[in-house]
């Protein structure tokens, strides 16, 4: 009499196990479709500089150290490290259980090969070679210990090592594929580069052997997703429709005007991720009239209703910028808030004081027979043309004529380097305040991104000190003074802190982004209803 009941229990257990197993298999075999917004011209992280390349490749490479969500550095491929007292030597003790996707062992030689490739002039690195700072060389102590030497203290070194641009690639793959390596990339990460078709798609497959994720990942072993396909949606108008039609599960840089619609649709969510670094900023050329006059630059700042610009263009999805650093960037100083409130009367007074008067009453001020005209070079991305149109209207209200040209990126770079502009915009993501050196160090005024053309000995001194100071509190004080000097001299017009607006299907669970805001951690992501 008890046998049928026993068999029924066994059958029930088998059914439950089968259901759980089937569910796990379904989850494991799932494929995520991710919409990218730029089709980079190159995606080798050691060579190329695009933020977009890091969105897929953060899942292909592991760094020597990780930057945790809380901000501290935690073990990655290096299980521990020591720093010399003068900050110029780092000894890394490496994990012994890691292999690259092609079976090549990860060891000290692999680290040395990667570093030497990055600094090799033939690599023509656009970003990684600068991020590695004052790297001088390395010494292999044993198979799993390497000492890295810097010619001088470089405070952002660990931050640089935690990014995909300094990710560890297979020495065997680097040697085999050489110039074609970007199509055959091999890392140690939770996903393997399966296929890359430029301008079309990039596909990753799960690494079944992955078991060395950082402590802040939320599970152990291989990733949940079987495959990830990245597709390119360069035109902003195509992104939300791709999400709504089910063509993608995630897509970045959703147009601000689509946010409200997605937030009322139960099928989707909106994940707004703040990007550290520099805001959308218009640099004012201090070497070209009329922006060579600090009173004119201050008048421009007072003439612009920046909160209204941000609200109109970005519809509440971005904070108004205060200075040369986004508010979520390490070292940001709130002391720069409110230095230039919208005050057109104050703008008019400043212009009057330096002789810019509307003599002929045509609405534009003149001085010595020359109209008060600003020449602006604009890029077409990031809603820059829309921002510039409102700026143009507000500046005209105080008698300033802003003439703008939308140009291709190479032409904008040339204009900035040669100082053809009065105003030119740019933004750059970075999790370390050393990014300010890119834009305000005197040495970058002729050939780099110092498009304000500022040559300030005190700023140079502070930037050098910030680069060679390890103490976090002291660094914050140094960069606070830099930000104050930048704004006191009215070198820039800060517009908005950058926010990446991601549209996400509610099927997606476990999505998080790293400290830079652009790069998703897809290892813990699952798909399901």
Image: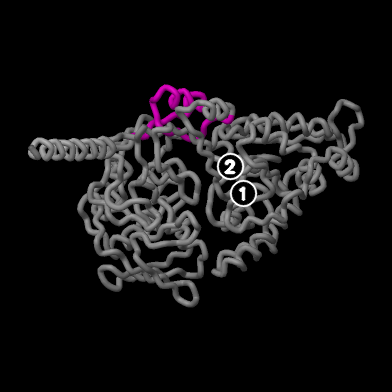
Q: Residue 93's x, y, as percent?
A: 33, 69
* Res 202 visible: no
Which quadrant is home to the C terminus? Answer: top left
Can you identify the residue that label 1 sits on? Answer: 326
Q: Is residue 512 left or right of residue 260?
A: left
Q: Nearer the viewer, residue 522 or 484?
A: 522
Q: Residue 437's x, y, as percent?
A: 59, 56
> Residue 345 lies in magenta, yes or no?
no
The span shown in magenta is: 229-256
Tell me if label 2 and label 1 are in contact, CB under 8 Å.
yes
| Label 2 packing within 10 angstroms: few (<14), some (14-19), many (20+) | many
Outermost residue toward the bottom in this view = 85
Q: As displayed, is residue 513 above or below residue 130?
A: above
Element class at badge 1: loop
Q: Is residue 52 left or right of residue 285?
A: left
Colour pattern: one colour
Q: As displayed, is residue 221 above or below residue 381?
A: below
Q: Residue 225's x, y, as percent?
A: 30, 40
Can you identify the residue that label 2 sits on? Answer: 498
> Residue 242 lies in magenta, yes or no?
yes
Element class at badge 2: loop
Outermost residue toward the front in this view = 1
Q: Nearer the viewer, residue 278 or 294?
A: 278
Q: Is residue 73 left or right of residue 471?
A: left
Q: Residue 292's x, y, as percent?
A: 76, 47
What whole-number distance in Å separates the C-alpha atoms at marks 2 and 1?
A: 8 Å
- Look at 58% across and 53% down and name the residue there: 329
């Amino acid at each position: 009499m008890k046998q049928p009941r026993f068999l029924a229990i066994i059958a029930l257990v088998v059914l439950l196990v089968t259901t759980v197993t089937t569910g796990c298999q379904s989850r494991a075999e799932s494929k995520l479709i991710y919409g990218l917004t730029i089709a980079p011209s190159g995606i080798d992280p050691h060579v190329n500089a695009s933020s977009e390349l890091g969105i897929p490749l953060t899942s292909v490479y592991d760094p020597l150290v990780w930057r945790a969500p809380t901000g501290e550095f935690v073990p990655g491929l290096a299980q521990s490290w020591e720093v010399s007292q003068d900050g110029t030597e780092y000894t890394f003790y490496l994990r012994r259980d890691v292999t690259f996707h092609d079976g090549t062992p990860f060891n000290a030689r692999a680290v040395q090969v990667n570093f030497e490739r990055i600094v090799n002039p033939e690599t023509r690195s656009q970003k990684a070679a600068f991020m590695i700072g004052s790297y001088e060389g390395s010494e292999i102590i044993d198979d799993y210990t390497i000492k890295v030497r810097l010619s001088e203290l470089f405070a952002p070194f660990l931050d640089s090592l935690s990014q995909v641009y300094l990710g560890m690639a297979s020495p065997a793959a680097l040697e085999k594929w050489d110039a074609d390596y970007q199509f055959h990339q091999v890392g140690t990460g939770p996903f393997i580069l399966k296929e890359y078709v430029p301008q079309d798609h990039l596909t990753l497959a799960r690494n079944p052997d992955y078991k060395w994720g950082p402590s802040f990942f939320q599970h152990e072993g291989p990733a949940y997703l079987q495959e990830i396909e990245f597709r390119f949606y360069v035109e902003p108008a195509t992104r939300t429709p791709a999400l709504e039609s089910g063509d993608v599960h995630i897509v970045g840089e959703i147009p601000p005007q689509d946010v409200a619609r997605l937030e009322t649709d139960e099928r989707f969510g909106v994940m707004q991720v703040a990007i550290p670094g520099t805001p959308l900023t218009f640099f004012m050329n201090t070497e070209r009239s009329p922006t060579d006059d600090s009173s004119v630059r201050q008048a421009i700042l007072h003439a612009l209703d920046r909160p209204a610009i941000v609200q109109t263009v970005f519809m509440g999805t971005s904070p108004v910028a205060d200075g040369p650093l986004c508010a979520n960037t390490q070292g940001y100083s709130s002391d720069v808030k409110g230095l230039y409130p919208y005050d057109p009367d104050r703008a008019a007074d400043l212009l009057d004081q330096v002789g810019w008067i509307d003599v002929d009453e045509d609405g534009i001020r003149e001085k010595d027979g020359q109209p008060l005209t600003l020449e602006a070079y604009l890029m077409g991305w990031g809603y820059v043309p829309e921002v510039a149109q409102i700026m143009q209207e507000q500046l005209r209200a105080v008698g300033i004529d802003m003439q703008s040209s939308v140009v291709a990126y190479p032409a904008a770079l040339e204009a900035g380097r040669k100082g053809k502009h009065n105003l030119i915009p740019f933004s750059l993501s970075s999790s370390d305040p050393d990014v300010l050196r890119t834009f305000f160090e005197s040495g970058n005024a002729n050939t780099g991104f110092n498009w304000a053309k500022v040559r300030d000995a005190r700023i140079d001194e502070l930037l050098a000190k910030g680069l060679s100071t390890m103490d976090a509190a002291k660094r914050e004080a140094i960069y606070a003074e830099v930000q104050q000097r930048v704004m006191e001299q009215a070198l820039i017009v800060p517009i908005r802190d950058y926010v990446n607006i991601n549209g996400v299907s509610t099927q997606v669970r476990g999505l998080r982004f790293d400290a830079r805001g652009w790069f998703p951690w897809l290892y813990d992501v699952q798909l399901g209803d």
